[in-house]
Amino acid sequence: MNPVVRSDIVVSAFLDSVGGYRHKERRDKLLDILDVDLDWRMHQISDGERRRVQLVMGLMSPWDVLLLDEVTVDLDVLVRSDLLAFLKAESESRDATILYATHIFDGISHFPTHVAHMRDGAFLETLSWPPPPLAAASGPSTDDEDVMEMRAGSALHGVALKWLKEDREVRRQAEASGVLKRTRGARAATDVPTDSETFYKKWVVN
């Protein structure tokens, strides 16, 4: 992590140092969404609070294309929900694009317009989201929004799980054929103990 964001500096001064005074309206909106205290000191706050400050810093300036990689991992569910709503509104109102990489699928079923499967740096498949059956189901319905969210969330989770299983199988086949060296999982038994095994057997009493 950038050492600057761990130094003894108050949040208000830190944000000004990266141009916060130029984007006061957006900065203030993000401060409310992310529940940030301008009097926090960067070296005294938690990792989750520090992540919120970094998000304010990174989103203050308007953008056309935004790359996000697991940016909500340290956020509580309320702040995460509000941030995703802000990002969705931003992309729709300004015709901006967000590329969002994540392993956390709860609460994002209505966030994407497209879902992409990548492997080894190449796109394998891209789906419009929600897919046609879910899009039709999201029309007039007697179900409440929570029910619709769960249905769409389950579908998104299912797609991601299918792709991840395919990727794992491709990797295992490559390892079995010798194309890739196997480095994960249990290792073949050997009669030669590791250095750490030898040490702990000698010096550690169970």
Image (cartoon, rainbow, N blue to C red):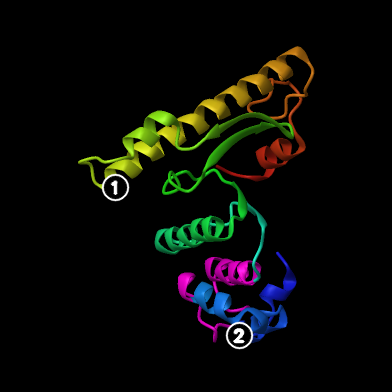
Q: Quadrant of residue 194?
A: top right
Residue 60 % position (x, y): 62, 72
Residue 97 % position (x, y): 62, 52
Q: CA distance from mark 2 to mark 1?
A: 37 Å
Q: Quadrant of the C terminus?
A: top right
Q: Residue at 59% of width from left, 22% of height from top?
A: 166
Describe the element under mark 1 as helix, strand or loop. Answer: helix
In the foreground, 74 or 146: 146
Q: Quadrant of the N terminus?
A: bottom right
> Residue lying furthest top in this view?
177
Q: Is residue 164 left or right of residue 18?
A: left
- Determine crowd level at label 1: few under 14, some 14-19, many 20+ residues with C-alpha closer than 10 A: few
Q: Looking at the rendered structure, which numbered label has been put on residue 131? A: none
Circle 2 residue: 12
Residue numbers of the magenta segment: 32-60
Residue 95 % position (x, y): 59, 55
Circle 1 residue: 146
For residue 96, above or below residue 162: below
Callout 1 amino acid: Asp
Q: Earlier in the sequence, mark 2 or mark 1?
A: 2
Q: Quadrant of residue 42?
A: bottom right
Callout 2 amino acid: Ser
Q: Is residue 7 left or right of residue 30?
A: right
For residue 13, above or below residue 101: below
Q: Residue at 52% of width from left, 55% of height from top?
A: 92
- Determine crowd level at label 2: few under 14, some 14-19, many 20+ residues with C-alpha closer than 10 A: some
Q: Is residue 104 magenta?
A: no
Q: Residue at 58% of width from left, 79% of height from top?
A: 44
Residue 108 % position (x, y): 45, 47
